Amino acid sequence: MAVTKFRAILETGIQAGASDWHIREGSTVSLRVDSKLVEIADFLVTKEFFDAAAEEMCSSKDLKRYDETGDADFAHAEDDVGRFRVNMHKQRNLRAMTLRHIKDEVPDIEKLGLPEVITNIASEERGIILVTGTTGSGKSTTLACMLEYMNRNIPRHIITIEDPIEYNFVDKKCIFEQREVGLDCITFDSALIGALRQDPDVICVGEMRNRDSFDMALTAAQTGHMVMSTAHTSNASQTIQRILDFYPAEERKQVRLSLASCLTAIICQRLMPRAVGKGVAPGLEVMVNNAIVRKLLEEDKISSLEQAIEGGASDGMMTFNQCLLGLVNEGVITEEVAMERATNPEALKMNLKGIFLNTGGGLIG
């Protein structure tokens, strides 16, 4: 732990309930509170202030990486304030930091507002589980919730590969090994290869970044392990397409067939301000690999996946529009927010009026 020049800024953000801090040399500080940016107008970050703070927060290794590449990712713990994931970078030839507050206590799935199907997915023994969404959509927290659910209920050996480690898990029913890239291992890919020799039940990788990562994930899933990871995609069909884009055209059919047999679920997430009080609520699209989804993948009918999701409520599946409709009806979010965040606003507008079109027929011919 440490006490740094940024302490007052960090404390201000914590008191305001901020999730992120944007600190730029020569500019005022901005916080993200309930998904909105709020400026701390009376504090200007000077060069001298940034120099001192960076020296306090960064290790020599982090500073070297920043000097060589213009980016450095690391974790920071501020005494009696909290833990933060930090990215230091350059913009307009000036330095900047983006900090994300990492809460030590993993929130409960139900408290976070995640549906029951998430626990069903976490209870599976093998396969690939992907949590997707934009930066700041809560992907890492949802993954952590699923891991903590296992920790409380299902004895497993869990290996996480992260950059940096975000949540520190305390062993309950599970045995955790948490490896930080650059500290405990060289790269995500090398750690994935090593993990297969370490008798894991579950391997959790911070992000699926390239073909090598996904090749190893497929290998692990095909040999009876569960692999969990994140991706920066907005819905299930886009996630499948992003994976296929890792491979040349002549290899994509085999990858699709492998996905059809190994995929467990894709959970796509967006955060929305609550209608009452502070805080955000997660909006989800959930695709579970049931018989219909499996056949669509095998037959390369990716464009029909949304229809399968819409008709898959019995398996816990839901589209974003279905989830948003439920959140509006429960009073969790407003109609205005739902319309802003909807994948298909026109369809949601009709749903809110009680009009539903039957689009689920003829999926499999």
Image (cartoon, rainbow, N blue to C red):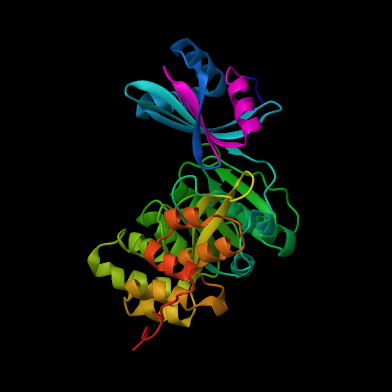
Closest to the observer, 200 or 304: 304
Up-down relation of residue 164 to residue 229 (above or below): above
Does residue 11 belong to the magenta stretch?
yes
At 28% across and 68% down in the image, what residue appears? Answer: 251
Q: Position of residue 77 (x, y in %)?
A: 63, 30
Up-down relation of residue 119 to residue 178 (above or below): below
Up-down relation of residue 116 to residue 21 (above or below): below
Q: Single out the residue that lies furthest toward the front.
A: 353
The span shown in magenta is: 4-33
At 59% across and 42% down in the image, what residue appears? Answer: 166
Say which quadrant the N terminus sits in.
top right
Residue 230 visible in the snapshot? yes
Residue 196 visible in the snapshot? no
At 44% across and 13% down in the image, what residue appears? Answer: 47
- 214 relative position to 104: left or right: left
Up-down relation of residue 139 to residue 13 (above or below): below
Q: Position of residue 112 (x, y in %)?
A: 64, 54
Closest to the observer, 56 or 106: 106
At 66% across and 44% down in the image, what residue appears? Answer: 168
Say which quadrant the C terminus sits in.
bottom left
- 305 relative position to 328: left or right: left
Q: Single out the residue that lies furthest toward the right.
A: 172
